[in-house]
Image (spheres, helix red, strand yellow):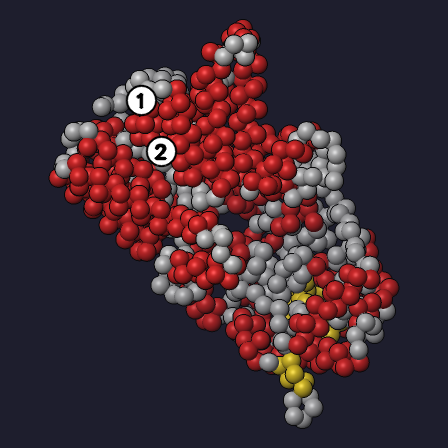
Amino acid sequence: MKLKLPESGFPGQFIAPKPFFVGVLLGFLICCVLGFICSQNQKIENFKRFHFYISPYTQYFPSLGQMVSLVKPARKDQTIVIVGGNSLFNGFGQRTEELWSEKLKQDLGDKYFVVNYSFDGAVPFEGGSWVAEMLLKQNRKVIYITTAEPRRISAPDGLLLRREFFDFKNHGLLLNSSKRSQTLDEHMNASHSNFDQSLLDLSLGKQVDLYTCSTELWQWVGHNLFFTVWCSGTHPNFLAPRASFGDTYRPHLNLDGSFLESKKNELIGEQNSVAFRNAAGDWEAFSRSWADADENYQTIPQELLRHSIVFVPRHSPLILNRFSSDQLEKYDGILEISMKRWKDLGADSAVIGNGFKPDDYLDMGHFSETGGSMVAHMVAEKIRESARRLDYE
Amino acid sequence: MIFDTYWFLFGVVLFLPLYWLAGTPKIRLWLLLCFCFLFHMHFAGAAGVVPIVVLASLTYFAGRSANRLFCAAAIVACTLALCHYKYSLFFADEAFAFLTPEAKDTFHSLVRSTLPLTPPLAISFFTFEFVHYLLEIRKQKPPINKPADFAAFTFFFPTLVAGPVKRYDQFIPALKQGLTAVSSTQVMLGLLQVATGYGKKLVLADNLTPYIESRDLIFSTISLEERWLLLVVLNLRIYFDFSGYSDIAIGLARMMGIEVPANFNWPYLATSIREFWRRWHISLSTWIRDYIYIPIAGGKHTKLRKVFAAFLAMSLCGLWHGAAWHFVAWGIYHGVGLCICALYRKVPVVGMLGIVFDKFPISAWLLTMFFVFVSRLLFFYPLGDAVEKFCLLFTTRIT
């Protein structure tokens, strides 16, 4: 049986092949050029933080151009403070005008240029950390600050912003880290036990994107003209450009007794697998339970760690007051272990939340606006200290 | 979805120009086979490729022998392989449902240990194509002589993962035609169809998915209107997803000058269940018709036999989609629909409805769509959930 091709049918009868192919090729090239132009002209007006409507939670993944544009205004003489980390430093629940990182800016003054790159749910070294690497590579004065709960780990390519990682990597903006390269190679090697098909595919796609700049074009359109992806967070206005969304999202908080009790039990359960009291009476880490984290920490470039301050957060008294004295002692012991590990790796580290009252927290872990002011003040002190250590002042 | 991976896009962008520029049909065929092999190896892995290669070899040699007994044996082997990889756990669980939970678990683990983590990629499609081929050979049709042609029929990458289910007597001439010459019009039309497919899949279906997921979780608390909207969206999503995939497959084949039959023809415009099945997943429904229904009930048979054949065919169609009772229920539901559709005009009084449908086709369309849309509940949810969701479509009660 021989099938006849609809050569003269719709749309074949209206379009001749040659003009069609020329049109496709021209359209493609124009999109690539537009993408490149967009990459050079990305801008997020009145940026304070990556709030809910311009975050991965609403399917918004800022492009390399957008991330880089945020530090472009920094003067050469200024020390650039890159804020990374998760919702704690994103100022979860804080209003923009009272955002802790805005207070940090005021506290540090004109000698510093502060940009908040943190994302709700991000791991300690992703997003902002890659901007910091880029700036360090350019020999700029940089201090990277982030939060990290004990044992918090991540893959070398991050968790939420894996695409952006490959953008930074493919553009040659990251510092050298042989351990990171080796880990990524393992993940992209089909014969290795750590093989991750999606990572290999992402890496391939991002190599193409280096030349086509399609992400930059799509992101520019999504930010300024219209968005194309539905998500419950922007329903029913999901087509609206993201620039039209303000930083207005306020979370619903759950602080009832049973919730706190269950969280307390969860925390205590976690503690039991993290550390034990050794013969000398000190708290010591179970090396097996920290192994993944330790393995991950090795992939962070040493140069970046040297310019980093990792803040280990302390939970609200709302929850810690439910601990017995033994449990609380163990809790503090684990914070100490965590801090020490970061210091051993070469980063500076401190606990935030010591001496805070329940009102300084919004829920069991996030800081309220008053708590945010205290965090800003404490972080500013640490930054100045690091700046002196790094001979920035 | 394999078609939206960069590996696939890269591969196709490299492969197609080579295919077009190749000087002779022979080189084109070998290029095609190499890419099919790479494609299958990459997405199925060696563990997924080996069983298919074994079944394909068996099918090829049985076909070449043109011996009815060998062909029958090969059909049994292919069907058993499908049952083993896809249904053995399901059958084992159901067959030993009467045992104690511990004994059931032991038996489950035992069967599980004989299976790979996932069944070989697209084994259902492979099996249907092999069985079709062998049945046709049993009807004295000429077999495919050249192993390379048979390999191209079996491993043709555009249709490998999700069809359309090919017929060898259509495919081989189309393949020869494509290997001989590809016109620029074919490439253009193919490219347009591929673009349409990606649009349906990535822009429409993938955007509807998160909506469905978010609303599905709170189905019992949303308003009645939104529940119906969700049902409509559920149906649109599966259509855009599947027909988009088919468009990409058919378009890619066309870009190689190879015509593959259409798989969808505006199914949601059907005004009867029979018409719906002539428009929806055409390659599968015609397969079921030709190789299950007609052998049982084709020609002059009693109505009872025809009804039985329709039920059996549609139940198997349901089971083909997945190893669970709700798929079987979905198939039976459609079997009932097809029987009613075929017989209702001959029933006194009820037959009057036919006059109404003829006069007002929109009423027939609305009833057909209601029947089809509701059936998706059975397709996507376990039986209990499907019934509960169905009830919630008619009650304003918000739980």
Q: Quadrant of residue B393?
A: top right
User: Which residue is located at x 17 percent, y 41 percent?
Assistant: B70
Q: Are marks 1 and 2 in contact (CB under 8 Å)?
A: no
Q: Amino acid at mark 2?
A: Pro
Work out whether A16 lies above or below A144: above
Q: Image quadrant of residue A27? A: top left
**Residue drawn at the location 57% of the way across and 55% of the way down:** A161
Instruction: Answer whether residue A375 is visible to the viewer in this image.
Output: no
Q: Nearer the viewer, mark 1 or mark 2?
A: 1
Picture coordinates of residue A383 (x, y %)? 72, 71
Q: Residue B272's x, y, as percent?
A: 48, 18
Q: Residue tagged by mark 2?
A: B164
Q: Residues within 10 Å of mark 1 (few under 14, many from 20)?
A: some
What whole-number distance in Å separates the C-alpha atoms at marks 1 and 2? 24 Å
Return the disc, 1 or 2, that comes first in the chain's sequence: 2
Label 1 sits on a secondary structure element that is loop
Q: Classify residue A76 as left or right of residue A6.
A: right
Q: Amino acid at mark 1?
A: Gly
Estimate the x, y position of residue B274 in percent, counting from the top left.
44, 21
Q: Which mark is residue B298?
A: 1
- Secondary structure of the residue carrying numbered label 2: loop
Image location (x, y in percent) of residue A8? 33, 17
x 20%, y 46%: residue? B57
Which chain is indicated by disc 1? B
> Is residue A112 positioned above or below A253 on the image?
below
The correct choice, above or below, for B345 with respect to A181 in the image is above
Callout 2: chain: B
